[in-house]
Amino acid sequence: MLWKQLNPSYRRLVRRGERGEAVIVNVRDDRQKGRIGDIYGWYLTIRVKFADGSTADFERYVEAALLTDGSGGSLLELAAGMIVPIRFDPEKRSRVEVDTAALASREAAQLAQQSAEAEATENVAVQRAEQDLKPLGSQPPPTLG
């Protein structure tokens, strides 16, 4: 757990801050402790765009443990160019944090959809094969010799 997560203002921001999006500009793996898939977390540079058209970059750290599936495996690999959900304070432009709960939820939903699509494809393949399957005893016995 990061120390900032103990801060009441941080917790309030990630619970009640306004929702938005940012793009990851730069990412660096933190592999020094190797908790999940040899990754402890990521050092991110995220870029936000304000209503006036200006942009700002923020350095943030995201723990891998916050982005895990039920079995403890990492849900994703963060990369430059990804759009990530954020929470921000409209009164103070520097108060921006990656919304890890929303990010984990989004990635879990995408993984579930991909799994369902793969299962549907397999079911179609099985149904096609069953149509071509000959009943037992309807084939002539093999000839020896």
Image (cartoon, rainbow, N blue to C red):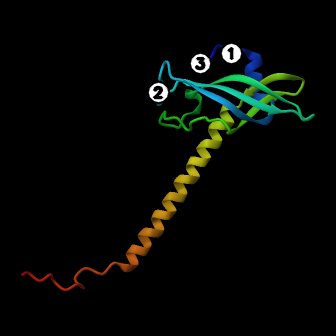
Q: Earlier in the sequence, mark 1 or mark 2?
A: 1
98 vs 15, nearest the viewer: 98
Identify which amino acid the numbered label 1 is placed on: Lys
Callout 2 touching callout 3 (CB < 8 Å): no
Residue behind mark 3: 1
Q: Could you tell me how many numbered marks the image carries?
A: 3
* Distance CA(mark 1)–CA(mark 2): 23 Å
Label 1: element kind: helix
Residue ranking furthest to the right: 52
Which quadrant would residue 59 be assigned to in this image? top right
Residue 8 against residue 129 in the figure, above or below: above
93 vs 53, nearest the viewer: 53
Callout 1 touching callout 3 (CB < 8 Å): no
Q: Which one is closest to the eye, mark 2 or mark 3?
A: 2
What residue sits 8% from the left and 81% below the top? 144
What residue sits 80% from the left and 32% below the top? 48
Residue behind mark 1: 4
Identify which amino acid the numbered label 3 is placed on: Met
Identify which amino acid the numbered label 2 is placed on: Asp
Residue behind mark 2: 38
Q: Earlier in the sequence, mark 2 or mark 3?
A: 3
Badge 2 crowding class, 10 Å Cα cut-off, few under 14, some 14 to 19, many 20 or more, is some
At which x and y percent is residue 114?
Answer: 55, 53
* Distance CA(mark 1)–CA(mark 3): 8 Å
What residue sits 15% from the left and 83% below the top? 141
Residue 66 against residue 145 in the figure, above or below: above
77 vs 111, nearest the viewer: 77
At which x and y percent is residue 5?
Answer: 67, 18
Badge 3 crowding class, 10 Å Cα cut-off, few under 14, some 14 to 19, many 20 or more, is few
